[in-house]
Image (spheres, rainbow, N blue to C red):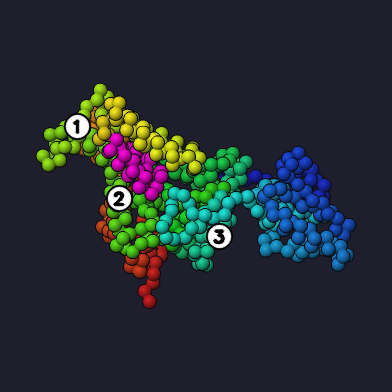
Amino acid sequence: MTNEVKEKTPIPKSPNEVEKFMKEKIGLGKSFDTGVRKLKIINKDVHFYYINGLCDAAFIIELTEELVQINDHEEDSNRLFDIVHNRLVHQSVKPIKSLDEMVDEVLSGLIVVVVEGEPQGLVVDVRSYPGRTPMEPDTEKVIRGSRDGFVENIIINTAVTRRRIRDENLRFEIMRVSERGKTDIAIGYIEGVANPDLIEIVKKELNNIAIDGIPLADKTVEEFLLKQGYNPYPLVRYTERADIAASHLLEGHVLIYVDTSPSVIITPTTIFHHMQHVEEYRQSPGVGTFVRWVRFLGIFASLFLLPLWFLFVLEPHHLPERIAFVGPNELTHIPVVVQIFLADIGIEFLRMAAIHTPTALSNAMGLVAAVLIGQIAIDVGLFVPEVILYSSIAAIGNFVTPSYELGIANKLARLGLLIIVAIFHTPGLIVGITIYIILLARIHSFNTPYLWPLIPFQPKALIQILIRRAVPGSQIRPSIVHTTNRIRQPKQ
């Protein structure tokens, strides 16, 4: 979609001219899935245009029966358009006046009815997109909680969200993006809570997307919205759970729903949003806090454990006497840093193989790889046992990270720290961590500091991140979203 205003061609009064246009524009009669149903009602032509597979045939049959019965009850053909409009027994019927709108609606799965002698058409929403039913997402499973999740249908996704928030101020503004794909995108927010400036920024950026199509859906939209380049750290949060989406809407976030994607984009976000998991809120505050600390520990280990251990290998005199055993007890001809990189890359091989392996075989494949390959690599002298141990702990820390994108970014940061430690030893680790924190502090997502509330420091907000508070005590919305209404639970 571009900012250029195109002159729209009006719908001709002759259905035959409309049919000719549709043959030239969308390949009517050439593409097997494009169709037209022609009726004769009160001596006038009435045409239905549709796409097979995107429309509910039962609705079309019912509408056809209603229109055919007009011949038995009406005689005034001058009022035919109003009569047809009245007889379309459906809750979603709207008039359109241009051929461009007509093409967009038909290709989106709606049907368009044109009546001879009228320079307009009627759009009926009888979409029935192929897809799966809502089910629990694989990446955001919980022990207790709802089992429904988002699917590839934007209508269902907005519906399961509205089911959780029955607020009259909940808004879903829809638009079409890309010149050829014409993908439906909905912006979700609560009016009077979400920041109006953020809403306008999101709308403006979406309207400025100029590309043929976005078949990769939400990820393409994210790259147009944020233009982050090669920065590996995620600047928006994805979720496939409707309860998480609803919680962020109530906090004042703006959500982006992209048709054909089961993930919803949450904006704005900080790095700590990517460290939270719904399981923390399905347990008591004490248990949720414990789970959160364990998760933070795993994320910290995935980042700094291997570089720190490697530094002790290079400079064992830094170790206190009580833990002097840390470090390889055996030596091989391969440098330790090379072993670490090989182990990390090998774990990445296993991850990719598990994704591409059929589910019935993936568990067996992982077991064989973990037990046989790792042990044999140690026996032949390729790795020392400690490398396998600490690489495995770091890998588990990656899997503990709730956000898949954050886990991959942390792995890249860890490899960078390993290289710096290998070259500069202790100063390298100190300087590397300092540069890492500075780079994160310089990141902004929709003018939101990435390390908030650590940088800039806000102690009350940081305490809420470290300690899972009970819901009745969380009466203030996070200030980082700049909401227009900070009170979540007005006092009685």
Disc 2 marks a residue whose amino acid type is: Phe
Residue at the location (38% across, 61% down)?
A: 282
Q: Compare residues 102 and 129 and report the one nearer the observer.
A: 129
Magenta part, dominant SS: helix
Question: Could you tell me if the residues under marks 2 and 1 are in contact, i.e. CB atoms within 8 Å?
Answer: no
Residue at the location (43% across, 42% down)?
A: 363
Above or below for 73 versus 241? below
Q: Earlier in the sequence, mark 2 or mark 1?
A: 2
**On the image, numbered disc 3 is attached to which residue?**
159
**On the image, numbered disc 1 is attached to which residue?**
329
Residue at the location (47% across, 44% down)?
A: 222
The residues tagged by marks 1 and 3 sit, at their Cα atoms, a distance apart of: 59 Å
Residue 17, position as x, y percentages in the image: 80, 46
Q: Is residue 304 left or right of residue 363?
A: left
Q: What element carries label 3?
A: helix
Q: Is mark 1 on a helix, strand or loop?
A: loop
Magenta residue span: 388-414
**305 falls in the magenta region:** no
Which-is-in-front pick, marks 1 and 3?
1
The residues tagged by marks 3 and 2 sit, at their Cα atoms, a distance apart of: 34 Å
Q: In which quarter of the image is residue 198?
A: bottom left
Which mark, by number, is residue 296?
Answer: 2
Residue 109, position as x, y percentages in the image: 67, 50
